[in-house]
Amino acid sequence: MLDKATVAAQLSDIFTDRHARNLTANGDRTHYGFKVANVSDDLSTFDLVLTFKSGRRYCCLEWGCHVRIFEGEYWAAIRTELARRGLGANPKLTLRSLRCVVEDGALVERRGACYRSGAYEYEEGPFIEGEDAPDFVHVEGTDEET
């Protein structure tokens, strides 16, 4: 029988593995930090913390560029990986909260230059498997819908 800790650990690994393939990660599983928490009793709802790490280079620090949870294909890939791991019977998934933590010293590449970010956090969500989410553009200190 599945429990919350197992589902949280497996989902954390799925996000980590998937994003190690991102261009700036170049196969490095430690490039981003992913942690799943607060899994619901029915194992369908969870929170996700995405950490942009100090000293690591990123194209930007916007969640939607890195975690395309608003696309059906993204959810399908997560569902496929859950099934591969024997967890495919979970009900429709809901990402209740995506909290992005930008560590002091995370690096952003723009127009050939590299800039050091200060620390900040922001949160988005919820995102429901199979449902399109509105597009958001994050401006530090605000959440502006486009």
Image (cartoon, grey):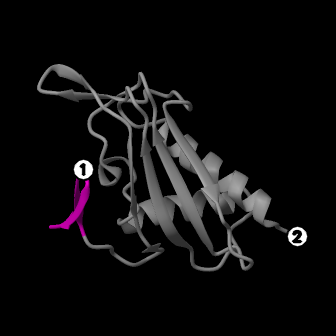
Tell me if residue 9 comes above or below residue 134 in the rendering.
above
- State the residue position of label 1: 140
Tell me if residue 136 comes above or below residue 14 in the rendering.
below
Q: Nearer the viewer, residue 21 or 104?
A: 104
| Quarter of the figure with residue 56 | top left
78 sits left or right of 130 in the view: right
Q: Nearer the viewer, residue 115 or 58?
A: 115
Q: Are marks 2 and 1 in contact (CB under 8 Å)?
A: no
Q: Residues within 10 Å of mark 2 (few under 14, many from 20)?
A: few
Span of residues in magenta: 135-146
- Most prominent secondary structure in the magenta stretch? strand
Give the number of the disc on residue 58. Answer: none
98 sits left or right of 61 in the view: right
| Quarter of the figure with residue 122 | bottom left
28 sits left or right of 65 in the view: right
CA–CA distance in space, label 2 to label 1: 42 Å
